[in-house]
Image: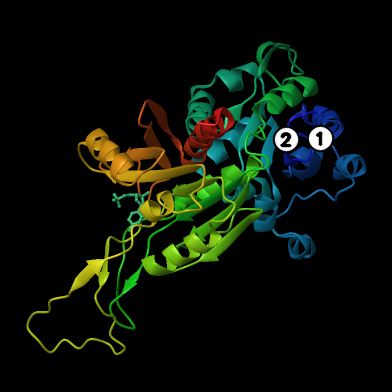
Amino acid sequence: MSGLAGQRILLGVTGGIAAYKAADLARRLQDAGAQVQVVMTDAATQFVTPMTFQALTGRPVRSSLWDAAAEAAMGHIELARWADRIVIAPASADLIARLAQGMGSDLLSTICLASEAPIALAPAMNRVMWANAATQANVATLRARGMQVLGPGDGDQACGEVGAGRMLEPMQIVNALDTSAAPALLAGRRLLISAGPTFEDLDPVRFLGNRSSGKMGFALAAEASRMGAQVTLVAGPVSLCTPDRVQRIDVRRAVQMRDAVIAALPGQDVFISAAAVADYMPAQTESRKIKKTAASLSLELVRTPDIVSEVARHAQRPTLVVGFAAETNDVEQHALGKLKSKGLDLIAANDVAAEGIGFESDDNALTVYSTSDRHAIERGSKSEVARRLLELIAARLESGA
Ligand code: C5P
């Protein structure tokens, strides 16, 4: 069965003569079992009519951010969430430039900005436009952000020239997507993931918190779900959308997170503790706002429960218990110490002092330690890094380790 079977593909079509081939591509993606929703730029509609795609896909084509009726049915954010992956074919030099700049100047570029789905581009343009330093720099930027660039191919061009810039043939695109489709490595597995910070209340208006954004834990939940797992996500206070098909339980304090995790434990195959749980909480939470009457104020703090250690020692311990170690120095030594003392199977260590990775950023890089080996996961988007970590976890589950 094709890796595209059952996938929801948002097919972006931009303005170029290769747009006519996108009609064939829509057909072939459906033949591979995918559901296809077409989004066209205005320029694309000059080459092929939306009716062509509507007839092929059975879905009305979307092209405007300002179509009130269409936005009411499925708004651009819903479209962005609907997509398991976004494929843009043909991708014009203009669209590539706008994506590289992070612009949201039309419906397609806005959806790309708002989606966490993997994006693949099949560029198509005149060979001089393709070779232009600006286009090459933009493509390099998009590649570095994790977008998949398919082609372009070499050969005769519609403009009469010969060279690189031809869009790949529809079946070449389908095959490239198929092999990069998320494999169902975690089908039938149950994963419990904690994410985000915890907030420990001092009084009704103040709390002790930390800088965790929750992005890594949410990326793990989204990717695990794409890989076929049944995912329960216990989330501290974060402003992130729940990934598709993920059951989310919101908590605030460490003790609430512990209770939610322990309650969800039966039947789980894996627990990934990606949350930045507070180590200490106030010995008591005042029911009224603390007044600034004294010149100084001492707070008594007590330890929170160590959730991942409790899970690792629990009678209903999942097969694999995976922790995170955010360190600023002596990363390996601290990570191995925690692996042992907390009774974990794997620990994913990241150097939060390193530039561009860590708490609030979109990128991460990890070194994953077990008692017997280590794997480096090189820098990438948190989604890519999540995929790599889940592949390691799937391999360990498969080998029964
Ligand atoms: O000891 P440290 O906080 O550095 O360990 C980090 C790992 O332990 C993370 O996986 C984190 O989710 C988990 N942890 C926990 N409960 C705590 C503190 C940390 O589960 N109270």
| Res. 185 image quadrant | top right
Task: Find numbered disc 1 in the image and state the secondary structure of the residue it sits on.
Answer: loop
Task: Find numbered disc 2 in the image and state the secondary structure of the residue it sits on.
Answer: loop
Would you say the beta carbon of the disc 1 residue lies within 8 angstroms of ligand 1? no
Identity, as a three-letter code, of the amino acid under mark 1: Phe
The correct choice, above or below, for 11 with respect to 16 in the image is below
Q: Residue furthest front?
A: 315
**Do labels 1 and 2 touch, CB within 8 Å?**
yes
Whether residue 147 sits left or right of residue 333 in the image: it is right
Q: Is residue 351 visible?
A: no
**What residue sits right under mark 1 in the picture?**
47
| Res. 66 image quadrant | bottom right
Residue visible at 63% across and 17% down? 127
Whether residue 203 sits left or right of residue 27 in the image: it is left
The image position of residue 320, as x and y in percent, is: 48, 41
Residue visible at 53% across and 52% down? 192
The image position of residue 218, as x and y in percent, is: 51, 51
Residue visible at 51% across and 53% down? 316
